Image (cartoon, rainbow, N blue to C red):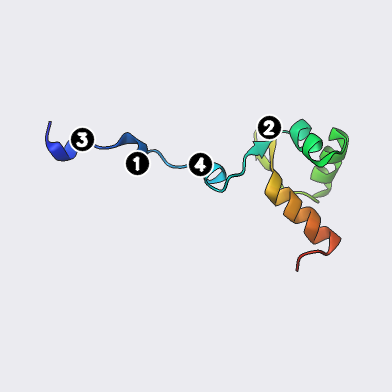
């Protein structure tokens, strides 16, 4: 095998953007626990479009920092 063919496989694997930002995607129950609200409230806010979510099929996940930013903007804290 030529010396330049010895590649580091870690460099070939794309990095997960959420992990790179330090965020992780949470389930409805995990987000509710993090915000100290009922899971049904998370569902209602999602349906109303008040908080952002990531959907893959029937699975819905939330980025906590994006949700907190959306809540702050709705309250008028950030412009």
> Which mark lies nearer to you, 2 or 1?
1
Q: Determine the residue located farthest toward the bottom in the rendered image.
A: 79
First in sequence: mark 1 vs mark 4: 1
> Which mark lies nearer to you, 4 or 2?
4
Distance in Å between CA atoms under marks 2 and 3: 39 Å
The residue at the point 16 percent across, 40 percent down is 4
First in sequence: mark 4 vs mark 2: 4
First in sequence: mark 1 vs mark 3: 3
Q: Secondary structure at mark 4?
A: loop
Residue 59's label in the rendered image is: 2
The residue lying toward the viewer, choosing from 65 and 44, is 65
x, y percent for residue 48: 84, 48
Distance in Å between CA atoms under marks 4 and 2: 18 Å
Q: Determine the residue located farthest toward the left in the rendered image.
A: 2
Q: Residues within 10 Å of mark 3 (few under 14, many from 20)?
A: few
The residue to which callout 3 is attached is 6
x, y percent for residue 36: 85, 38
Distance in Å between CA atoms under marks 2 and 1: 30 Å
> Which mark lies nearer to you, 2 or 3?
3
Q: Residues within 10 Å of mark 2 (few under 14, many from 20)?
A: few
The residue to which callout 1 is attached is 11
Q: Residues within 10 Å of mark 1 (few under 14, many from 20)?
A: few
Mark 1 and mark 3 in contact? Answer it, CB < 8 Å. Answer: no
Q: Secondary structure at mark 2?
A: strand
Q: Secondary structure at mark 1?
A: helix
Q: Which quarter of the rendering shows the N terminus?
A: top left
Distance in Å between CA atoms under marks 1 and 4: 13 Å
The residue to which callout 4 is attached is 16
First in sequence: mark 4 vs mark 3: 3
């Amino acid at each position: 095998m030529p010396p330049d063919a010895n590649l580091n496989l870690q460099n070939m694997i794309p990095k997960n953007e959420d992990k790179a930002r330090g965020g992780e995607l949470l389930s409805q129950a995990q987000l509710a626990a993090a915000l100290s609200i009922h899971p049904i409230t998370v569902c209602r806010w999602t349906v109303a479009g008040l908080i952002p979510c990531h959907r893959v099929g029937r699975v819905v996940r939330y980025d906590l920092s994006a949700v907190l930013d959306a809540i702050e903007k709705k309250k008028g804290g950030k412009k």
